[in-house]
Image (cartoon, coloured by chain):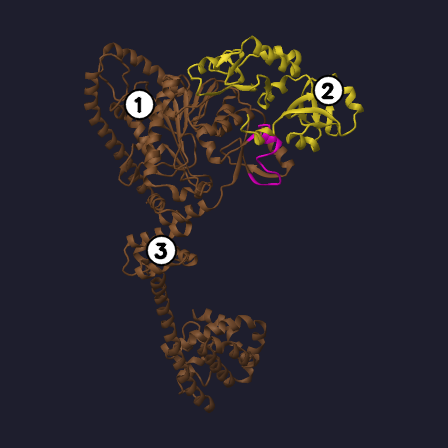
Amino acid sequence: MRPLDENETTVVFEKIFKFVGNNLKNIVENPSHEGPEPEAGRYCFRLQRNRVFYVSESLVKRATNISRKNLVSLGTCIGKYTHAGSFHLTIMSLNLLAANAKHKVWLKPTSEMSFLYGNHVLKGGLGRITDSIVPGDGVVVFSMSDVPLGFGIAAKSTQDCRKLDPNGIVVLHQADIGEYLRDEDEL
Amino acid sequence: MVLTRSKKRVAKSQTPPLKRAEKPQALALKRKAEKPQALALKKGGAKSQKTPPLKKQKKEVVVEEDPSEDDDEEVSDDAAASTDVESDDGEEEGLGSSGFFSDDDGEENDDDGEELLGDDFLEGSGDEEEHSDSGSGSDSDSDEGDIEKESKLIDEEEAKEEEDAKAELLDFNKEAGDDAFRLPTEEELEEEARGPPDLPLLQSRIKEIVRALSNFSVLRPNGASRKDCVEQLKSDIASYYGYNSFLIGALFELFPPVELMELVEAFEKQRPTSIRTNTLKTRRRDLADVLLNRGVNLDPLSKWSKVGLVVYDSQVPIGATPEYLSGFYMLQGASSFLPVMALAPQENERIVDVAAAPGGKTTYVAALMKNTGLIFANEMKVPRLKSLTANLHRMGVTNTIVCNYDGRELPKVLGEKSVDRVLLDAPCSGTGVISKDESVKVSKSLEEIKKFAHLQKQLLLAAIDMVDATSKTGGFIVYSTCSLMVAENEAVIDYALKKRSVQLVKTGLDFGQDGFVRFREHRFHPSLNKTKRFYPHVHNMDGFFVAKLKKMSNMKQASEDDDEALGTVDEADVPSDDDEAEAMEEMEKPKKTKESKEGLAKSKESKKGKKSKSKKGEDPPKIKKQRKNRTEMRMEISQAREEKRKAMREKSKEKQ
């Protein structure tokens, strides 16, 4: 386990910035209540076995006794580095992203299951959409009852979505909670 | 008596004339039933012919009103009359058919039946028949004579039949006993072994033997010892339900035969599916509403759980709803709630879960702690780590570190005396969850149980070593298994009590059966009754065992631990029932003061049960302590037993 170096930090922050925008500050400076000390600590990012974890400092301190081979997970895993060296956010970061998301999309109940199977979000399944979405933005997908379902990349801006035919893709699927069942091994 | 009789007989006396008309039908019906009764009716009929027309009219009037009652009475009267005819000459007691005719003269019937015949119309027919002296009609005389003989014959036959019936009943028990209880001979067993097992035969034999064993002195089959019956029962159950002989023998030692059958039947069925609400994300009420909308049929689990729900049936797969995927609930058996409830983790504590996969208990602990504090979730097997990590993330747990160690190494890695509480849900033979995994029935042997027990003892000692006894809010270890075997449960706890300075405290679960204090040749520490056992056939959850230990001191002590553990039993019993936090504080303070005193004085223990935490020059005082404390320990045990016996005696006296 080691802290992220400069490059890695920039890459990770960029990815998160797409989804949360200025709320990134919140994420980084969130007071954390984990750990046995009653005072709040801070969160930090650590890299372990090609996975990036968002953990409280007090946890990090105590995890140092665990050897590298045996440490599996700390706090929340937010993403992993592929063999090629690019960084992808995984579904396990959903809670963090959903709490701070700037761009959101709500799905109709009928198309929830389709998204959970890994399909992209079509115009016909769209319930609500926040304004000022630019193509390429990170979007967090919710159900109508405000339960986060996953996230993806916006394919069209909000204006264009209105003109789109019902089968047009609005959000490109990146991760959804159905992966907990489908791709448990990949996580 | 007679007066009342006469009153009663009013209705009856007036039945016979009507009966004349009904007689053929009645006779036809009753011939099948009993001959003597029909004859009695005939007698009655004969009698009634004698009665003057006036009386007939009266009787007819009354009879019309209550025919049914009269029928019944007549039947019973006749039956009684027939017996009376045999036994008593001229005495009409009870419901003789004489009653029909002698209402008004009930008083006179007993003695004067014969004499009054000519004058009274209502005299008992029984008397008249018996004493053919009475002659009111020549025709009836000869009839009566024949009838009398016939009736006697029939009565004798009836008596014989009754005796035969009784004898048959007795014989039936014996014979049926012989047939079913008679244990099969060698040849029969060989025959059975040749073909496929005859299931109905096995089942009936099992039931018979269980019945016999429940009242062996009365129902024992001929010439068979209890041991033979038990052996036969074991082999029958093994072949009918598919167990190996070791497991059946082990279960036999734990339960009486009737309960064993219930247990085995319970193992054949699944326990109800239950889920646990994730209080980090939702509340039970809201979750229940959402799931009901999806078409899931559910109910709150029990009154002892505020987060459990039991699922009866569901239109959608309960493990794949969007709510499940969002981490609102976890599929978890009801018995798995129990060790976490016993552990009762507080906020801002350090907890270790030694065998955490797949993470149901770990996530429950995190939910109780509200994502504060710190949890080390350890799992030895690599393939199971993925599901553990996935569950933790799905349920939104952020205060956990997952590591991959052998549980026995954990104290070296994490440091001794470094955590507040430890949850050890030990790997076990799984004999309590046979309903989930049928392969356990045939795959377990004595060697495996011993291996598991050995591993569990090591893990428990390691777990105890990790705990910091001086922790302000903690110092507890919860040990649980999903097995019923004493070797994996009570024996392991007893071993830990001897090897470390720990004590058993109440689990905080107010239902469930207490653990065994003694079992066959083993005698465990008396506080073992604070542990809890759960059975499928009693509590409708998987077989489970839960024990909660409190660490008294951080020293690893060898043989002294018996003494000190025992010594503090009496004193610590009282505070352990109270709030743990308060008790902890109270006990900590006196301990610490005594520590300093004793540390300075380097003295041996002056009072029973106060632990010396002096760490200088301990050997001589230790040895003296040991010698002293052994005798003291024995005395304490015997005192405790005496008190128990006294309590039992008083209870039995009160009951009487």
Colour given to chain B in the rendered image: brown
- The residue positioned 40% from the left and 44% from the top of the image is B441
In the image, the segment drawn in magenta is B311-329
As drawn, the label of residue B513 is none
Check the image and name the residue furthest to the front: A84
Q: Secondary structure at mark 3?
A: helix
How busy is the neighbourhood of tag 2: few (under 14 within 10 Å), some, or many (20 plus)?
Answer: few
Q: Are marks 3 and 2 on the same chain?
A: no
Colour of chain A in the image? yellow
**Counting residues from the N terminus, which is met first, the one under dot 1 or under dot 3?**
3
Residue at image coords 29%, 34% = B524
Q: Identify the secondary structure beneath mark 2.
A: loop
Image quadrant holding the N terminus of chain B, namely bottom left
Q: Which residue matches tag 3?
A: B209
Queried whether the magenta region covers residue B167, the answer comes back as no
Q: Which residue is mark 1?
A: B501
Which chain is indicated by disc 3?
Answer: B
